[in-house]
Amino acid sequence: MVEIIKSDSLEMALSRNPHLNAYIENYRNATGRTPEFVSVADNSIRDMSSIDVIYPVGDPIFIHIHLNDEGAKLYTPIEPKLTFDEVIVMEEILNMLLAFATDYPAPDNEEVLEQNLEELFFKRVTVGVANKVRGTSATVLPELYDKLLYNLKKEVIGLGPLEPLIRDPNIEDISGIGAKDVYIVHKILDSMQTEVTFGDNDRLSLYAKRLSERVGRPVSDKNPIVDATLPDGSRLSIVYSSDVSARGPSFTIRKFQDIPISIVQLIKFNTMSAEEGAYLWLALEYGQSVFVCGETASGKTTVVNAMIPFIRPESKIFSAEDTPEVRAPHPAWQQLVTRERGAEDSRVTLFDLLKTALRSRPNYIIVGEIRGAEGSMAFQAMQTGHPVIATFHAASVKKMIQRFTGVPINIPVTFMDNLNIALIQQAVYVNGKFLRRTTSINEIEGYYEELGGVSTKQVFQWDPTTDRHIFRGMNNSYILEKRIGQTAGLPDPKMIYDELFKRARILKYMVTQNINSYYDVFKLVKTFYTKGDIGVPIFG
């Protein structure tokens, strides 16, 4: 919807966007300060002593982050805005254009819808000496023409007031509690309030209703809570009725990234160490089952997506999810999604999808999130030799075992040794900064009757004092020595540690060489699988 143009300098941005110049002038007059302009928001802005920065997210949208009177961070979108009178003109023109929309076939996607809207606009709206709508055409003042087209697109194709937030790649999460309290989670600057407003709760109710209808999950007083997926894959949750949400309608959008974060980026962020990445590489190469556990918004799905490129490139992969978030770069990847609406006999559950996946004999099964009965099917898959990757809500290995062996999943505790590895992911605060860390990687050795429980071993542990990841499994790893080393046919299973550190060297090489892209990482891993050491420059 918005043409993405990178602004290399403030001067270039101002030359194309007069509304940006007006905003900066008004801000300077009100505060006596001039914000710093950066072409790309990166970690350097986190270290600013007093944040006051503007960055572009694609013309004509810019983002201003600054401190309010109480010293709290405030997120302000800068975009071409309409006056009250101009909004009335836009509504009249929109009604006129909609009358001609029936001349077009129903659009297959947003791109076609945008093309149709532009064609109608250019045909019916021209520049004139006044803002007037006459029958089948309209004229607008020159300064309104481009501004009007942007706002029409924002309302018809985009997400209205939320469009700048959706366009900002630095935002992970958007939450609205009532009409005037919209908050975000920023990848660099953590949580903050925005200056986005819906006016009043009646307008927000209408917005929520229209948005839910667009995604095929209409809300109502009878059905006030809806979970859905936006066209870009982001998760949407709406609480519509004031009977349920005391402060008015509320919503949450968990943004979807079309290109997942790579394992190399996670190592750069210190989410995990290169040795932990190498451990996961070996685990997935040799078909180990891995569950990524943690609390909500701890980065579980991010870690799962980041590790998937370690699966051998020729593997057949099946993913099963309620909301499609898993991304696999493998050619033989089948993405399965539940169908929760419709008649009871037409619904498709995660349990159904896992049964279907098992019949197809995949090399790996990936479950978006285990919550209930599908957990027993996942363990049946592992029992029959199909490795599984899944996310699960549990803050520790002990809690994970308790939840799996309790209601409603009810896995016999003796089955727990079908799982090989439990990775614990957490959102933590380090020196006042919100970070995500792999706090431990644990091996499931097995169930021992004499112990009356499941034996586990922690091979990696995060030290919060030093923010370092410590390898505790050196010469003491059950998975590396017993499961992988013996399968690899090594004359001495302890030679597997040499292989672990070799993979860690490859990951560190990618870090230093800025081989960050998800697909570039997969390409190098694939080359290593096909050519061995000579496929990696540091060994060539």
Image (tube, rainbow, N blue to C red):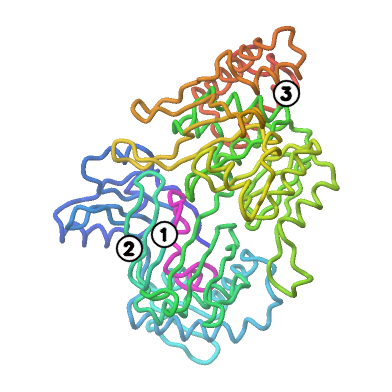
Give the residue displayed 68% in from the left and 35% down from the top: 289
Which range is magenta? Answer: 151-173
Q: Earlier in the sequence, mark 2 or mark 3?
A: 2
Q: Amino acid at mark 3?
A: Tyr
Q: CA distance from mark 2 to mark 3?
A: 52 Å
Residue 346 at x, y = what percent? Answer: 78, 70
Nearest the eye: 500 or 379: 379
Tell me which label, 2 or 1, sits earlier in the chain.
Answer: 2
Mark before the other along the chain sequence, 1 or 3: 1
Q: Which mark is residue 385?
A: none
* 532 and 152: which is toward the camera: 532
Is-magenta flag for residue 414?
no
Q: Where does label 2 land, which residue?
A: 19
Whether residue 60 is visible: yes
Residue 446, located in which quarter of the rendered image? top right
Residue position marked by numbered label 3 in the rendering? 529
The residue tagged with tag 1: helix, strand or loop? loop
With respect to residue 520, does 345 lie above or below? below
Pointer 1 residue: 60
| Outermost residue, front side | 450
Density class for disc 3 (Cα within 10 Å; few <14, some 14-19, many ≥20) is: some
Q: Quadrant of residue 196?
A: bottom left
